[in-house]
Amino acid sequence: MPLAPSLLTVQPPSGWTLVNIDNFAFSDGAGQTLSANVLGTAVLIRATPVSYAWDFGDGSAPLVTSYPGAAYPHATIAHKYLAEGTHLIVLTTTWRADYRVAGSATWKPVSGTATTSSSSAPLTVYEARSRLVDGPVAY
């Protein structure tokens, strides 16, 4: 049964950012409920995310968390790019699952885990440089 990858959101959402500026990433942290018919018996599977690995695409080590992060101003997953370039942020979510057979009130654990991956749109990183000038600047 295929799990849908976690939703990945990046801030700023414009598709570009600046060197040495915090960029935020987060997921919705939502679980999934799947259903199947096994030998004529309905079974529900409840998948819950248990860890998130955030790869910011710039060669830095992935950041692994047990929480999905949050949107600005409550952001908890931040990354600063140190050089110009274009990067994809990849989120790998690890899931655990429980199952319940139709007619039963008891959820039982599924052994093992599963992973899904989602990626952002390309994020272009620019370097902004200020310049001092003598006199007014014409626009």
Image: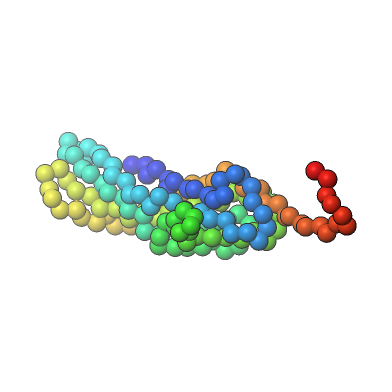
Left or right relative to 99: residue 82: right
Residue 87 position, x and y percent, is 63, 50
Question: Looking at the image, which residue is at 11% across and 44% down?
Answer: 103
Tally the numbered discs.
0
Left or right relative to 132: residue 28: left
Question: Looking at the image, which residue is at 68% across and 58% down?
Answer: 19
Which of the 4 quarters of the picture holds residue 50? bottom left
Residue 128 position, x and y percent, is 73, 55
Left or right relative to 111: residue 138: right
Residue 124 position, x and y percent, is 66, 48
Question: Looking at the image, which residue is at 42% across and 48% down?
Answer: 6
Q: Quadrant of the N terminus?
A: top left
Q: How is the image coloured?
A: rainbow
Q: Is residue 14 or residue 139 the one in the foreground?
A: 139
Q: Is residue 122 or residue 34 the one in the foreground?
A: 122
Which of the 4 quarters of the picture holds residue 68? bottom left
Q: Quadrant of the C terminus?
A: top right
Question: Looking at the image, which residue is at 51% across and 57% down?
Answer: 54
Residue 136 position, x and y percent, is 84, 52
> Furthest residue to the front?
136
Asked if residue 50 is positioned above or below residue 102 in the image, the reply reads: below
> Furthest residue to the left?
103
Residue 121 in sight in this render: yes
Residue 53 in sight in this render: no
Which of the 4 quarters of the picture holds residue 83? bottom right
